[in-house]
Amino acid sequence: MRMAADRAGARPRRIKVAIVVTRMDLGGAQEAALETAVRLDQEIYDVRLLAGKGGALDGEASERLRERFVPVKSLVHPVSPLKDAIALAWLWAFFVRGRFDVVHTHSSKAGLLGRIAAFLARTPRVIHTVHGWSFNDFQGGATYTFFALLERRLARISDRLIVVAASLADKGLALGIGDTGRYALVRAGIDLEAWRNEARRKGALKREIPDLRRKVVGVVANLKPQKAPLDFVRVAAKVCAERPDVDFVYVGGGPLLADARDLAEVLGVGDRVRFLGWKRNPRALAAGFDVFLLPSLFEGLPCVFPQALALGVPVVASCVDGAAEAVREGVNGFLCQPRDIEALADRVGALLDDSALRRRFSAAARASVGEEFGFDAMARGTAAVYAGATPR
């Protein structure tokens, strides 16, 4: 894409981009949106990042982008006909007034309202990043069908669909969402250098948990139904029943935190499953894990996979969506079917019991995370999509 010109003979103006995410919560979609806004070449792109108020990353976004971060009061997660209508109208007016060349949405609600508003504003290029489809295999048939049909309609007003995992494009195409030429694969990036260079030691964990046992199975994730935190506790109970030298650590917060704590007490592992909440430096805590366990019900390709692997921590996870594009079965981790507590516990136990296997997986994990997972590659890939998107 060449820089646009306001009038013949004028110096080309920067390409105006509005990146929209529902709210700047802690998560891969939010970090991808922020890092894209920060890392796009400012000599070429004039970027605004729009998000609903109240996210944990609002302060960081404001500090790094200053006036280029635009909070949208009416953009909220829950379905709210009044607020959603106001948000749609606000976004439409913002896009018209700003004469944006590109609107790029992340997350389901922003993807819905942002794309419709951009279409109504006749924005030349409308792009959406699919971090995970709005439908999943654990929804009822009617709900699944409704969201699949909605995604099909939204694809018609999208010039390109960026996916963070190839499997998401395969699933979308199988359901008639867009066509092959509409998809582009751009991984959600991580700070590769920081994760690769983090020393593998339990110092940070020991400071948080002075009585930490010798071996640690952990996760960094939101405690919401998608991440199946209660299954994490169930796996912990099975593993701990046979091994007195292991603790399970959950770094993160969310709506199921109280339920997870209660279940740990009921299963007799209240002192073996430690819930730390959100911490400022989860990387240092994850560096103390011997095994990373994420029993999700559905995913796109969560950033915590390349993060853990870059640290050299073997991963045990559910085999959903893009998981196999990062976790290689029997090489740097193990993949099991969602809800298969027995299989998940068995694979975690195998890694805990065999130090040679852990070392082999750890070396393979570090080697498996390529530059495609870095922030810079994400920014370059996104800019290439902007350039290649066909205006409607």
Image (tube, helix red, strand yellow):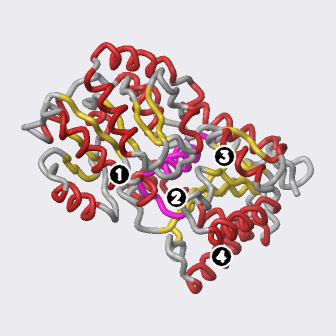
Q: Which residue is mark 2?
A: 69
In the image, is residue 102 above or below residue 53? above
Which one is closest to the eye, mark 2 or mark 3? Answer: 3
| Magenta stretch bounds | 22-41
> Sequence-wise, which precedes: disc 2 or disc 3?
2
Q: Which residue is mark 1?
A: 231
Q: Identity of the amino acid at label 2? A: Phe
Q: Which residue is mark 4?
A: 88
Element under label 2? strand
Element under label 1? helix
> Sequence-wise, which precedes: disc 1 or disc 2?
2
Q: How far is the residue under mark 2 from the one under mark 4?
A: 18 Å
Q: Is there a contact, CB below 8 Å, between mark 2 and mark 4? A: no
Q: Identity of the amino acid at label 1? A: Asp
Rate crowding at label 2 as few (under 14), some (14 to 19) or many (20 or more) other CA atoms within 10 Å: many
Q: Identity of the amino acid at label 3? A: Leu
Q: Nearer the viewer, residue 46 or 337?
A: 337
Q: Which residue is mark 3?
A: 168
Q: Residue at x 45, y 23 (%)?
A: 332
Element under label 4? helix
